[in-house]
């Protein structure tokens, strides 16, 4: 099964996909060209129209399929990173004067935890929220 | 290029058997082969495309499941300082299952389900205590949720792989097609669990923790006492009304037993309670705003059944009105880091709860407010 691990297997899968897409693309271009050429002749009969349209249609479908294959194959290769880039923010609030301050999250922060002294009145501040500022969509598309 | 094509193209006469040079013959053969292949194997080719898409998704699922297990191991090693390698215990835990009780005879099914859930919870606690002996109680609760998320990722991967292999083995278009249609949603769900791991490992609040967060702010400053099971109670006064605030004990990742806690409080007051208000995160529909607060009737609680049933039952027995306040959010928002919009909705939710408290009871009466949800990263 293609889902099993191993770089050699993955590389083989990638190359085969790439090869098939490229061959299909070349064939599609040839068919499209042939379709166009049909209409370049002097007399345009019904048969010429029939074959011309057929070849152009075949070429277009082939090109579309090949584009799909190529793009998904390249997408598979490009996205390996799964790094999460979320920025966590801790909000500290003074229970006495209500002074609110945001700072980057530090491991161990949780809501209602006592924090540093308030810079305005000196009372111990408390953490009132921990949230993610701009949740990024990590590049977790494929291995 | 076109001159070349013109000279080699299978013009109508050639397609009918004309052109004798090798390239023209090759084109003619290719043309007929493709035509016949599409005619006879079109469906099979479509299935192959679907299979390829599912395999791509499966690669993601496998990667996330593997990373889930690795991060569980790392968390256990960092926080639990085990004396032996916990790998085999973690591997075993990943395959752990619970068989739901028989529902052909529905009488007492919730009692049996609750019993099984209790047994399952005790099993998890014992496993974590064994593999992470140096972790504190809150850290153990967090390790449990990390393992649960890793287990979910592992399960999703195995099920998708099963249906893919089954579809391939039986050449079933329908199995592959159904999987292909559902794979975006499955992948989204798994991605949510994968992203949730980070919050679970760090022990920061998640979207689902909005209920406990509202409750913790409301009970701030009040003396707290522990109530069964894994719950904390703080009594406050709102415009002369005695308001009993309940939330799961934090900041470890727990949901506790809200049904039992509410029942105990109501029994303590011999049923003389003017109302019950539950606050919980609820799934929003696509297009709705995250953090929006909505009020309704009923118990806002997403447990498998026993806790919700217990609150409904005790409220019915004593004829106590039940109201619910929900904070809307998407599935992935509920289990990943709490978003700013959700954290900002705390004050609005408290204001709404206060309004309901005033509507529900007169001065001197008792009202119960329960913050439902996972209290990960939310203390009291």
Image (cartoon, coloured by chain):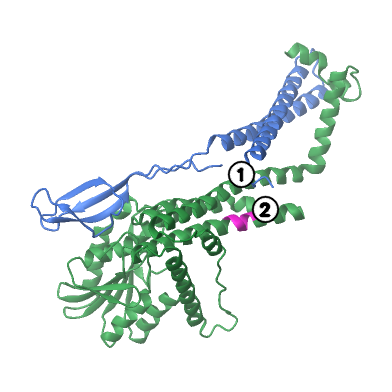
Chain colours: A blue, B green
Q: Chain of mark 1?
A: B
Residue at (41% x, 51% y) in the render: B198
Query: What is the magenta range?
Result: B157-161
Quadrant of the rendered image containing residue A29: top right
Tag 2's secondary structure?
helix
Q: Look at the picture and state if B12 lies above or below A65.
A: above
**A5 up-or-down from A93: above or below:** above
Q: Is residue B359 magenta?
A: no
Q: Residue at x 48, y 82 (%)?
A: B111
Residue closest to the eye, B14 or B244: B244
Task: Identify the residue at horizontal 44%, vertical 43% (top origin).
Answer: A137
Image coordinates of residue B339 in percent, x first then y, are 34, 51
Q: Earlier in the sequence, mark 1 or mark 2?
A: 1
User: To which quarter of the image does residue B306 belong?
Assistant: bottom left
Total number of numbered discs in the rendering: 2
Q: Quadrant of the C terminus of chain A?
A: top right
Give the class, few, some or many, for how many residues have Cα within 10 Å of label 2's Cα (few <14, many ≥20).
many
Query: Which percent across, then down, holds residue B268?
Result: 27, 85
Residue B162 visible to the viewer: yes
Q: Which mark is residue B164?
A: 2
Pick out the residue farthest to the left. A121
Question: Would you place residue B89 above or below residue B365 in this image?
Answer: above
Q: What residue sits right under mark 1 in the picture?
A: B56
Q: Is residue B344 visible?
A: no
Would you say residue B159 sits in the magenta stretch?
yes
């Amino acid at each position: 099964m293609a889902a099993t691990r191993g770089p050699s297997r993955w590389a083989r899968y990638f190359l085969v996909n790439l090869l098939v897409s490229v061959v299909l693309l070349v064939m599609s271009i040839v068919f499209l060209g042939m379709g166009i050429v049909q209409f370049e002749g002097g007399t345009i009969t019904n048969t010429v129209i029939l074959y011309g349209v057929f070849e152009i249609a075949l070429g277009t479908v082939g090109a579309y399929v090949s584009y799909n294959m190529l793009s998904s194959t390249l997408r598979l290769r490009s996205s390996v990173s799964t790094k999460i880039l979320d920025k966590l923010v801790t909000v500290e609030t003074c229970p006495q004067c209500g002074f609110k301050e945001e700072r980057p999250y530090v491991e161990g922060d949780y809501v209602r935890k006592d924090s540093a002294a308030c810079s305005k009145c000196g009372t111990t501040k408390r953490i009132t929220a921990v949230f993610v500022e701009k949740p990024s969509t990590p590049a977790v598309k494929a291995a | 290029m076109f001159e070349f094509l013109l000279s080699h193209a299978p013009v109508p006469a050639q397609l009918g058997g004309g052109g004798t040079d090798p390239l023209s013959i090759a084109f003619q053969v290719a043309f007929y082969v493709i035509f016949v292949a599409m005619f006879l194997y079109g469906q099979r080719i479509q299935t192959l495309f679907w299979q390829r898409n599912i395999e791509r998704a499966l690669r993601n699922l496998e990667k996330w499941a593997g990373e889930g297990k690795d991060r569980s191991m790392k968390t256990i090693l960092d926080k639990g300082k085990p004396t032996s390698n916990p790998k085999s215990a973690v591997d075993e835990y990943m395959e752990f299952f619970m068989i739901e009780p028989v529902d052909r005879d529905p009488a007492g099914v919730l009692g049996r389900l609750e019993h099984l859930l209790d047994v399952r919870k005790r099993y998890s606690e014992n496993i974590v205590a064994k593999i992470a002996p140096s972790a504190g109680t809150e850290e153990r609760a967090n390790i449990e949720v990390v393992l649960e998320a890793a287990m979910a990722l592992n399960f999703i991967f195995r099920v998708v792989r099963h249906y893919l292999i089954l579809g391939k083995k039986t050449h079933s278009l329908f199995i592959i097609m159904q999987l292909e249609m559902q794979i975006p949603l499955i992948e989204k769900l798994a991605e949510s669990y994968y992203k949730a791991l980070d919050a679970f490992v760090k022990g920061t609040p998640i979207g689902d923790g909005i209920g406990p967060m509202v409750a913790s702010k409301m009970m701030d400053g009040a003396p707290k006492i522990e109530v069964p099971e894994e719950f904390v109670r703080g009594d406050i006064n709102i415009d002369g009304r005695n308001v009993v605030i309940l939330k799961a004990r934090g900041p470890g990742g727990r949901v506790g037993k809200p049904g039992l806690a509410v029942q105990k409080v109501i029994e303590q007051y011999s049923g003389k309670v003017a109302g019950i208000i539950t606050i919980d995160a609820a799934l929003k529909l696509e297009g709705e705003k995250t953090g929006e607060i909505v009020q309704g009737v009923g118990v806002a609680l997403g447990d498998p059944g026993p806790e919700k049933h217990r609150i409904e039952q005790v409220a019915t027995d004593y004829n106590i009105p039940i109201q619910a306040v929900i904070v809307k959010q998407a599935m992935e928002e509920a289990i990943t880091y709490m978003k700013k919009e959700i954290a900002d909705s705390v004050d609005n939710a408290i204001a709404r709860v206060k309004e309901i408290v005033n509507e529900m009871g007169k001065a001197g009466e008792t009202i119960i407010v329960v913050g439902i949800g996972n209290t990960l990263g939310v203390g009291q």
